[in-house]
Amino acid sequence: MAPVAMRLAAQSLSDAQPVPFWLEDPGKPGALPALAGPERCDLLVVGGGYSGLWTALLAKERDPSRDVVLLEGREVGWAASGRNGGFCAASLTHGFGNGLARWPGELAKLEHMGERNLDAIEEAVARYAMDCDFERTGEIDVATEAYQLDELHEWYEEADRLGLADGLELLDSDALRAEVDSPTFRGGLWDRRGVAMLNPAKLAWGLKRACQDLGVRIYENTPALDLVSAGGGMAVRTPYGRVAARRVALGTNVFPSLVKRVRHYTVPVYDYALMTEPLSAEQLAAVGWKNRQGLGDSANQFHYFRITADHRILWGGYDAVYRFGGKVAAEMDNRPETYLKLAQHFFTCFPQLEGLRFSHAWGGAIDTCSRFSAFFGTAHQGKVAYAAGYTGLGVGATRFGADVMLDLLSGERTERTELDMVRSKPLPFPPEPIAWAGIGLTKWSLARADENGGRRNLWLKTMDRLGLGFDS
């Protein structure tokens, strides 16, 4: 990084608060009391992020008489659900390319199921009056290199062959820069209907309120400590109480699963984001962005960026940081060296915004798995279900995962449970120090590929053949 560029990037960060922008909201609901004493229920949901909240809500919608309890270790939405970029995608497979590589025979069905899932989220936002800035403006995959543009054209052609190109539009450089102006843009692929923008914390809080209105009992600041069989059901111990339940759904994602054999399938990856101060009218005119799409570039080390309801720009991604041993720790939530790198990249993308400052900078842990998209299963003779591994694309897909968990707990054979994606598992990560060394080599190889026209080295080609990967 040139000294002048580094100094300008550092100056832009001088007032940035090291806290998630979304969670610093005066409308944030107060915490509910912790569980104290014994509880009983039909369904216990562990985890108060999107995965758990959707599971509790859908369980009550399916059967209003079902007695549902939800436990959250801190406060609803405080972790990944309140820290992400607010991209709510229809894709259940972490994007078209990943789905095509892993489930080509099922991809058309998965894409249609994802569209219905996003439609259902939009309907729920309206039905429960969730004030979460939901805007179905789509997302543009941006090419900043010629090889990336070739790949986007290939994806469009494959989508067209499968009858999935409705709503997709290829953009050349001029057309893309007419939408959002950056000298780095060479073209893009606009998915007009497949992604919505929203305020992620407000979605979590809206789901919390909807669950309560339907009779779900929510206990916050109540970590689940262990899970054991108890009679014909299950029991979960908490610091001050115990819950006995006929069935249990685990939506703990990046945190260690109460089903220990599941833990080897995920690792925590730290992702970081910046939020600018609100743009002036002149700054908005300089970038355009009238249609308010989400954007993401097509590099291996990619950036995602979007504009908020109050005309700020969120800029995140690029670094995906894995800590030796796979620990989730609060000290990893802030990483100044990544913030400096992201700020420099921001002004490379938008030089016309030089002088704009960042108001917030934060990070958080994502549960990634080796196939990049969620996996599912049961334990304790079908009395416990789990979903995990969303790899940063869980804002929308967690609702689908909630339906899968409820299907599995009911013992029903459904369109969802018959999917190979649902019936199969990713390859687990190896133990340390092999995991740390392998992830480090993969990150280095991905960076080299970005520098060398997308050409993948022998390590990445081997990983591709084995169906393994590392992403955020």
Image (cartoon, grey):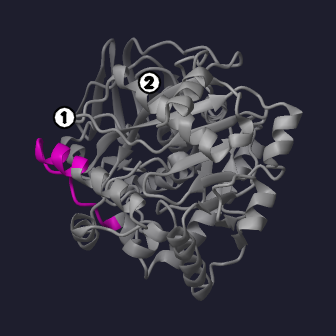
Mark 1 is on which residue type?
Answer: Gly
Label 1, label 2: how far apart the Cα atoms are: 22 Å
- Is residue 153 at least partly visible in the picture? yes
Q: Which residue is mark 1?
A: 325
Q: Magenta segment: does it hold 436?
A: yes
Instruction: Identify which residue, 146 or 75, lies in the foreground.
Output: 146
User: Residue 319's quadrant in the figure?
Assistant: top left
At numbered mark 2, what does the secondary structure look like: helix, strand or loop? helix
- Is residue 83 at least partly visible in the picture? no
The residue lying furthest to the bottom in this view is 161
Q: Residue at x 45, y 52 (%)?
A: 406
What number is the disc on residue 336?
Answer: 2
- Disc 2 crowd, CA 10 A, few/some/many (<14, 14-19, 20+): some
Q: Residue at x 42, y 63 (%)?
A: 412
Image: magenta residue range = 423-440
Q: How many marks?
A: 2
Above/below status of 161 relative to 165: below
